[in-house]
Image (tube, grey):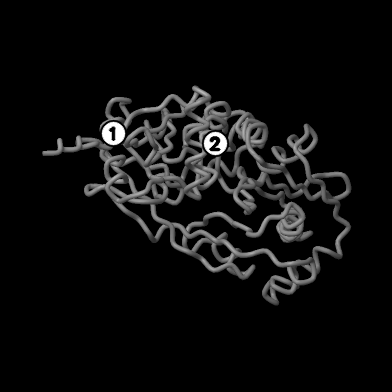
Amino acid sequence: MNAPFPIVRECVRVVDLRQPDEAARIEAFVTEHDGSVFHRPAWLLAIEAGTGQRAHGLVAEKCGSLTGWLPLTQVHSPIFGRLLASSGFAVEGGVLCESDETALNLIAAVEEYALRLSCPTVEVRGGVAGRDWQLRQDSHCGFIASLAVDDDTQLAAIPRKQRAEVRKSLENNLEITIGKGSLERSAHYRVYAESVRNLGTPVFPKSLFDAVLDRLDADILTVWAEGTPIASVLSLYHDGAVMPYWGGGTWDARRLRANDRMYYELMLHARSRECERFDFGRSKTGSGAYSYKKNWGFEPGPLSYAIWTAPGYAARDADPTSARHQSRIALWKKLPLGIANRVGPVIARGLG
C-alpha cells in the first residue's frame, strides 16, 4: 500500500521588505500577476521614506512558492487615528493572489495583524473583502484609455468641446518642461501646494514626492507662463501606462488653460516613452474632477474599497467630503500659503 501524501497547507506570514531578497521576490510576483505600481514594495518603501509611515506586508506561501501578497502601510495620525492601508497613499492595492481561498486567508490574517499593531481600521483599495467588512463600489471611479498612434490622432480623439479648450491652450505662449531635477521638483511643489490649499486640503510633505521620484519610474511635467510655473504634475509609469498622480494649477492656470495643455502634453510625452495607456486616476463619483475626465472622453469604471473596523471602535473618518470636515476645509482655504505649507505636511502625512 502506498503511503499517503502529506497535506500541504498554505501559510500566511509577515514579510520584512527591508530584506532585498524578500522585496525582489515580491516584485517578481507583482509583475507576474499584473499588479499595479501600488502593489510594489518599492512604492511602500518610498512612502515610508517620504512620510515616516511604516511599510508592511503579508504573503501567502505554499510549497515554498508565493501564492498571494497584501501590501500594507501602517499610518498613524493624531487627528485621524491609526490605519493599515493597502496600499498607503494609493488609489489601488488590495490582495494580489491566485485563488479566492488565498484572498480570504490574507484578509483574515490582516484583521489579526492590525490588532497586533493597534490599528483599529484596515482599508483595502481594490480586490476582495471579508465577511464583516464594509464594501463600497459607488464612491470612486477610475479612468483609463488607450493612447493614440500620433499627435494629430491624439488631438482628434478628444471630444469636440474639450478639444477646443486644448486648441486654445496651444495658442497661448506657454513653455513645457519635463524632468525630475531640482528645478522641476521645486516648481511642482510650489504649484501643487498652492493648488491643494485652494481646495482646502493640506499639502503632502515634499519628501514624499522626492522619495517617489528617486525610487520609482516617475517624472514631472510643468507648464510655465513668462517664467512662472502655473501647472505641474508628477506622473508614474508602470506596465505600459502613465498615471498623472499629483498635479494641480494656480489661479492663472485656468485663465490660460494650462491644465488642458498639461494633460495633452503628457499624453504626447507618454507615447514617446512607448506607453500604451493613459490612466487618469480616480475621482469621486459625481465630482468636478469626475466630470472633467469624462469631458476628455474617458469612461468611468467603478472602484471597490473595503473597510474593516475592529469591534468596539468607531469608524475612521478621513473623507474630505464628510460633514465633519467641511468647516475645517473652509478655514484651510483662507490660510496664508506660507502657514498652510508649514502645517499641512504634518497633517497630510497621516491621511494615508
Q: Which mark is residue 11?
A: 1
Image coords of residue 252 (percent x, y): 76, 53
Q: What is the quadrant of residue 261 in the picture?
A: bottom right
The correct choice, above or below, for 111 with respect to 104 in the image is above
* Amino acid found under the numbered disc labelled 1: Cys
Which residue is at the far bottom?
Answer: 160
Image coords of residue 350 (percent x, y): 47, 32
Image coords of residue 55 (percent x, y): 46, 29
Task: Answer yes or no: is residue 83 visible.
Answer: no
Quadrant in the picture for the N terminus: top left
Of label 2 and label 1, which has the lower sequence position?
1
Q: Secondary structure at mark 1?
A: strand
Q: Secondary structure at mark 2?
A: helix
Q: Residue at x 47, y 48 (%)?
A: 33
Which residue is at the far top?
Answer: 19
Is label 2 in contact with label 1 (beta carbons under 8 Å)?
no
Which residue is at the far left?
Answer: 1
Image coords of residue 315 (percent x, y): 30, 41
* Amino acid found under the numbered disc labelled 2: Trp
Q: Which mark is residue 43?
A: 2
Q: Residue at x 39, y 37 (%)?
A: 66
Q: Residues within 10 Å of mark 1 (few under 14, many from 20)?
A: some
For marks 2 and 1, give the one nearer the viewer.
1
The correct choice, above or below, for 278 with respect to 155 in the image is above
